Image (tube, rainbow, N blue to C red):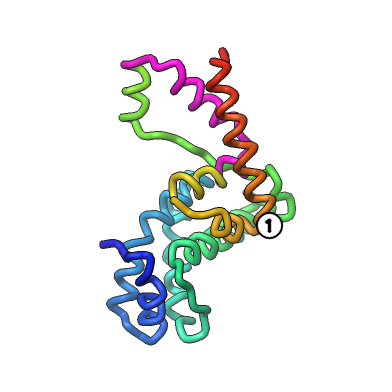
Amino acid sequence: MNFRKQDEGRVWASFKDGDNQMFSAIYSVYSRKLYQYGLKFTQNRTLIEDSIQELFFELLKNRKTIGQTDNILRYLLKSFRFKLFRILKHEKRYDHRHESEDYVFELNFSIEHEMILREKEDHRTTVFLKSLQELTPRQKEAIYLKFTSGLDYKEVSEIMDMGLESCRNLIYRAVKSLKEAVQSGKKW
């Protein structure tokens, strides 16, 4: 089940008004996306699952007082990111004061992608994937949110708690770096 973009405001309002089936639907649709996003910061699956459970518990508990949204994924990603960073900081694994580049954000592809790379030995793809790993963690996160999660610049900037122009520049520099690496056929 997925919600149509134009229905998300209504879905959220129904949840806020006490519709438990809508709450379950929101959890079903978005919990896996939150989990995949969490894996980009830590491989501690229990911590990710606990963060998701805590987030949804707090949403349920505070449903009457939380804000309205017309983009549920953006709302949940931003809330989840904040919660996960707070927990990681509490465990002394992440210091939010030094967010600029001091956290890990991993972009990994499935085994199928790796098999295709080996079989075809596509140099351009190999260059792209290696160049992707050379990006800063914030660039990787922004690229993930923009191109994998399909969010717009404004949504990415809100989730990452940065200005819109800074977000655009961050993504622009990352894409430019990747493009230049692939065009040059960079060798390692």
Is 15 situated above or below 182? below
Residue found at the very far right of the displayed protein = 97
Please tell me which residue lies in front, 151 or 135: 151
Q: Can you identify the residue that label 1 sits on?
A: 163
Q: How many other residues sit within 10 Å of disc 1, few (<14), some (14-19) or many (≥20)?
A: some
Local SS, label 1: loop
Please tell me which residue lies in front, 57 or 146: 146
* Quarter assignment of residue 2: bottom left
Please tell me which residue lies in front, 87 or 55: 55
Number of labelled discs? Answer: 1
Type of residue at label 1?
Gly
- The quarter of the image holding the N terminus is bottom left
Please tell me which residue lies in front, 133 or 98: 133
- The dominant secondary structure in magenta is helix
**Which residue sits at x=43%, y=56%?**
34
> Within the magenta stretch, is there residue 6?
no
In the rendered structure, the answer to whether residue 28 lies left or right of residue 50 reads left
**Which residue sits at x=56%, y=40%?**
140
Is 20 situated above or below 174? below
* Quarter assignment of residue 63: bottom left
> Within the magenta stretch, is there residue 133?
yes
Q: Position of residue 119 (x, y in %)?
A: 31, 16
In the rendered structure, the answer to whether residue 68 lies left or right of residue 170 reads left
The magenta segment is 119-141
- The quarter of the image holding the C terminus is top right
**Which residue sits at x=39%, y=54%?**
33
Is 139 situated above or below 145? above
Q: Position of residue 135 (x, y in %)?
A: 61, 34
Q: Position of residue 179 (x, y in %)?
A: 56, 28
**Which residue sits at x=45%, y=67%?**
71
Q: Position of residue 82 (x, y in %)?
A: 58, 61
